[in-house]
Amino acid sequence: MKLSPQWVREFVDLSVDDRRLAEDLTVAGIAVEGISGSGADAVFEMEIGTNRPDAMNHYGVAREAAAIYDLPLKALEAKLLSGARTASDSDSTAALKRCATKNPADFSITVEEPQLCPRFSARVVRRTKIKASPERIAHRLQLLEQRPISNAVDATNYVLWEMGKPTHVFDMDLLEGRKLIIRKAKDGEKLKTLDGVERTLTSDDLVVADATKPVGLAGVMGGFDTMITDKTRNILIESAWWDPVTVRKTSRRHGIHTDASHRFERGADFESTILSCDLVAALILESGGGEMVGDAIDVVSRQIDQAPVVLRVSEVQRILGGNLDVGEIFRILKKLGFSLIPEGQEDAMFRVQIPSWRMDVEREIDVIEEIARLHGYDKFENTLPTYSGAVVELPHAAMDATLRERALALGYNEAVSLTFISHADAEMFGFSGAVEGSTSAAKTGHQSEVEIAALEALRHPKTTSRQVLELENPLSEEASVMRTSMAPGMLDMLAWNLNRDSESVRLFEMGRVYEMRGGERVEPARACLGATLAAVKGSLPASGVLDVSKGEQAAAAEAFRSFKGDVENLLAAFAYRELSFDRDTAGHFHPGRSARALMDGTVVAQFGQIAEEVKWQRKLRQDVFLAEIDLEQLHARGLRTVKFAPLAKYPAVERDFSFVFADEVGFEAMRRAVMRLRLGALRSFIPVEIFRGGSIAEGKYSVLLRARLQSDEETLRDEQIARWSGEIVRALQGLGGVQRA
Amino acid sequence: MAYTIPKLTDYSAAALEKAAAELLSASDQEWQEVRNEADWKALRDRWMARKNGILTLVNDLWLKPAPKEAKRDVGQRVNEIKAQVERDVEKGRGLAKNYPILHECFSSSVDITLPGLRRPIGAEHPVVKTTNEMVRVFQKLGYSVADGPVVETDYYNFEALNFPPNHPARDTQDTLFIAGQQGKAQRERLLLRTHTSPVQIRTMEKMRPPIRIVIPGTVHRNDPPDASHSPMFHQIEGLAVDTNITFGDLKGTLDHAMKEFFGSNVKTSFRPSFFPFTEPSAEMFVSCFICGGSGKRGMDPCRPCKQTGWIEILGCGMVDPNVFEFVKDNGYDPKKVSGFAFGMGADRIALLKYGVDDLQLFFQGDVRFLGQFA
């Protein structure tokens, strides 16, 4: 909101300059965000809180300034040329007149909705002339970036900015039946508003109507057909008090936000309806001539309740702390227009009457805020409260911190991506917890009908108990669904980097995914790793290479193993007996180069290279690796607790075994076969070198395996070692392996 | 040019001093050039041989021809020279022994100026880092961490925080709503929480007073992304409720926290504001931690504080009694307890702290940006 300090100075004799005034208003909560121009044309950019419609005008700000500087505030008066009755700010309650009144102009007002229109005041100006506003008025409006239109319209605008009460002017000769009715609109009834838009009304809209048609959308905007034109001679000035909720609903329903609706929604000054009519009338008469006809019409069908508030000095101190003296409290409230009557004996207590323009003040706490605000927040002493209580962390804090530290140590940069995804991605990536049971149809080829049905259900989430959360008002289609998986966000970030010549990229993100499960919303925690092939390869130490054969297959195996190592490093922080892997990953993973990690049979992660089609769809310039970790599963397990094992006293012995196996036999099979031997002294069994090609037949590979044997009780003897080696060889042969010389 | 001993003609103190200095400088230089046994022997003979050794020549050329009155001074000088030369020759002997070992070490040296081979270390995200740091400040003040759902109901996000249905204050929140909620009662309708404040209510429903909680979390608003807006951002909320909490406590707590976070020389200032769930409400400013509150950086205007010397950091206030009414049954009778709440934007604080000029950088995952925080 724009404000002219010069205009404010008309109502209060300020000795401070504009800059100081701006500062002091801001400290009192009437925030001046900026100053432009200078001298008489200086303009303040105001930021007035929703609760302070009374300060959204010049007189209201002048009232605050008067209170801040303890200066008198000049009364706001309409200088009416004819002998008609005038009302002013202080002349509060006009005589209550129930139901419709008539006036000498023979014009009737009927309020059919007294709850929604407690007060409707009006004035009639006859035989005036519509022309441009005088320079004084036009200039002021322009200063506030308001476009001058004509003297009558500008008068309403001027009064709104001067003292905050919205009014409306009708061309009285265009009102049919010499009457106005305040009623609900009929469903489907039409009204062309001042902005030229024809609007279809509903029975929830409150309108001002003449005998035949609506002529204004109550509190929001007047009608086009009854507006002031060059031909207008007779004017009806309307100033009403509308129910804030009704105005807000209508304003939102029709998408019209006006300076008037803004104020009515927040609560206008109930007692300023006549004053505002008079001020508008005076301005019209001054520039366009004419005459006032009769008294103001004033239909008060319901008095707005502004019950006095009891203020206890003890409560002021309980909330604010410190020792504000009663004199200061009294002075502040008086200056703001509150009146105080002492009450009670023992405790200092007052009955506070709220001024009509302060609809926001209803309770004791509201009054206390006024005291604090004008006293100055910074004047209250800073204190620290005492407290006895324990500090509690979130249950998963330590686990999440450990996981995060490990990811950082592994070289993954922490990333945060937006929580929205597109419908297409929701469909492609499914629910990330869907690591259980989301086997890809394309991959295994043979699936039970049940599995296919489950997959179909997943692709059409509406039909299952798991549903995505769609946004009612998304920013775009790309951001229209709450993410069900961290994968799309991670892939977008990897693509972003690859498109900017960052080749070696490692990212991780911890966050939540969102879904409806059986009608309940759930927000499971997830972690996601992403890495480009260049990064994964770059972290392979030369000494760590296992598959020494040449070619793409070996390189891919090594890259996968490198990434898998990172995943294992993260998972190793958690408690489990056995970690195993299978190939049943979701469809967005490369079917041959991805795995699920299972802790004691429960899926905790899926990871590996991304599927070719996903890579092409997202225009990824490199193969990328992704790991989706189900933090809920890890949280349920907790961190591994370290238990000390005594250091070995006797030397260890290593024995190597060179075998040729068929490609179908994976290392896990060998490991299991050897573990089944239950050799008490077997400390580890690992592959050390893999080779394909050369003298090795197609479809087979050579592998060098290393067993490490060690006893807690004795130094192992050669014959024991030989016997165990023989058992290991036989176990491996049992898998079809052929020992090499 | 190897040193040769001059004849002395001028026996003044200055001339004598100069001649002695030249001789000793030659001696000092020559012992350092010894590389092996042979070098050392040559050095010894050159300086100390009885016949034509330099020390002998000093005797013959300087002392003997000296005039009588200078004899005593020259004699003393010559003795000093002899002692020093003998020490130098002895040093030469040591060097002859050690040089081969030293040589071996130096010839196998590495270029210590080559860049170190750095194993990549991941960088903490600046917003997460800022959040954690701020949370820690409040944990030290006795605050426990609390959290709550991102997808909230209208009740927790608005109604119980004293935003009545159809209240204009709701307009300021630019809410993103979940689709398909029309069939539900308004308070049951799902939306994306616009602030972390719903967790205040959720926590008060579960825990009786006194409480002190700090709530870090993700929030969403319908703001198109630009340099200073994002539809998703992060807040850090706080709530303290007890029988004795005052506005002075609110100010004191936040003043302490800001000094802890930004440095002990920052000042705080509070200005009136409006939030439906607090009253009195305030905005807190800290003196600009970039320009030190002067509004200038050298000759240039300080941009982060718009030359005002103050930066707005958070909104806060005393918990509105209407909010307590919603959890009154759990011990929050507004007549008996009072409290304060505050909320700040973690992203904004991170922007200011690191001088980042575009909020979008936080959410792109660009390693050129993230890597700077390693």
Image (cartoon, coloured by chain):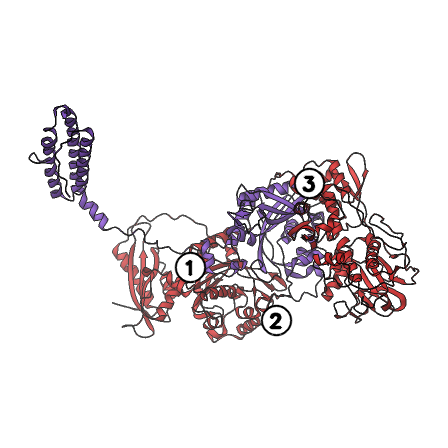
- Sooner in the amino-acid sequence: mark 3 or mark 2: 3
Residue underneath mark 1:
A566
Query: In the image, is A414 to the left or to the right of A542?
Result: right
Q: Which mark is residue A320?
A: 3
The foreground one among A685 and A36 is: A36
Position of residue A236 measured from the top left corner of the image (x, y, whole percent): 85, 62
Q: Secondary structure at mark 3?
A: helix
Residue at (32, 75) in percent of width and height = A698
The amino acid type of the residue labelled 1 equals Asp
Residue at (18, 33) in percent of width and height = B20
The foreground one among A736 and B19 is: B19
Q: What's the distance in space between the residues labelled 3 and 2, CA to CA?
A: 56 Å
- Sooner in the amino-acid sequence: mark 2 or mark 1: 2
Query: In the image, is B43 to the left or to the right of A508?
Result: left
Chain letter belonging to callout 3: A
Q: Residues within 10 Å of mark 2 (few under 14, many from 20)?
A: few
Q: Secondary structure at mark 2?
A: helix
Residue underneath mark 2:
A463
The amino acid type of the residue labelled 3 equals Leu
Chain letter belonging to callout 2: A
Asked whether residue A396 appears in the rendered view, the answer is: no
